[in-house]
Amino acid sequence: MKRRFWILYLIIFTASSCNYPGKLPEATPLSTPRLGRPTLEIATFTAVPSETLPVEVELPTEIPTSTPLITLASPIEQPVNCRFGPDISYAIVGALNPGRQAQVIGKNKDITWLFVRNPSDPSTSCWLSVNYINVKGDVESLPVVGPPEIMVTSIKVSVDPPAMNVACDAFPQSVILSVQIITNGPAVVIWQWESSTGRKSAEKQLLFESGDVKIVQDYYQVDRVGDYSIQVRTLLPNSVARETSFKVVCTP
């Protein structure tokens, strides 16, 4: 019975000891969180060096543009006439001699004649027959050039005698009018003269089978003393005029 009492007491005492608060540990107050000023951070890019490797750059390939070559003509064996137009009927205006070359700048439609810088006068042009020349260069790409206009290129006029002294009772007298007409090709030339006295000749015709120089003459009658002038003019194929003068005196 006593033993049972002590066991019960011991159980009660132990249970009471477990529930006794004793000295409780002080509670650590929680720290109040502080809000700091937000910091604006700007990220900066730092270049990271990379390993440099040789890079092969393929350059565009230049396509060479072909420079047009100058086409040149040279005589085969002997001097070649250079004519005003693409036919032997045109006047000769130059010559291509052996050892010389002429720059070709055109051709006629059937490529039987070539249009070149005149070897006798590079400021002008003329035509060479392909039968008598060697050609170096591209003829096919040359432009086709039409034949030139056929025309009278020059007139010269003179009177014989240029001065006359006759007896005052020896009138009428006559002077000889000489007219030199030059064409660049075959043509029919119509011409006439007119004097300072108002007299005018009939229209006269002169046939040129090719470019050439022709001299024609006419007589002019003088009825009195005085100073005279005569003008010669071509009417066809184009108009060209020249004038000359002469003097007539008399001795009583």
Image (cartoon, rainbow, N blue to C red):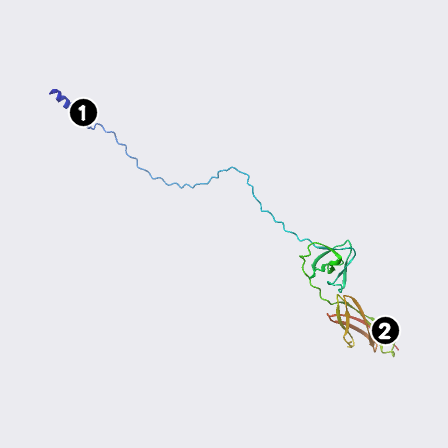
Residue at the (15%, 22%) spot, across then down: 7
| Front one among 111 and 53 | 111
Q: Which residue is mark 2?
A: 164
- Quarter of the N terminus within the rendering: top left
Tell me residue 90's x, y (percent): 75, 64
- Quarter of the C terminus within the rendering: bottom right
Instruction: Name above or below for residue 212 compared with residue 248.
Output: above
Q: Which residue is mark 1?
A: 14
Q: CA distance from mark 1 to mark 2?
A: 183 Å
Residue that sits furthest to the bottom in the current view? 169
Pick whichever of labels 1 and 2 is earlier in the sequence: 1
- How many numbered marks does the figure carry? 2
Mark sitting on residue 165: none
Instruction: Name above or below for residue 151 compared with residue 1.
Output: below
Tell me residue 130's x, y (percent): 73, 58
Kindly identify the amino acid type of the residue bearing the numbered disc 1.
Thr
Task: Give the left or right position of residue 47, taking residue 250 as reference.
Answer: left
Task: Give the left or right position of residue 112, taking residue 168 as reference.
Answer: left
Kindly identify the amino acid type of the residue bearing the numbered disc 2.
Met
Residue 149: image quadrant is bottom right
Residue 173: image quadrant is bottom right
Residue at the (13%, 22%) spot, across then down: 4
Residue at the (18%, 25%) spot, across then down: 14
Helix, strand or loop for disc 2: strand
Instruction: Name above or below for residue 55 compared with residue 172.
Output: above
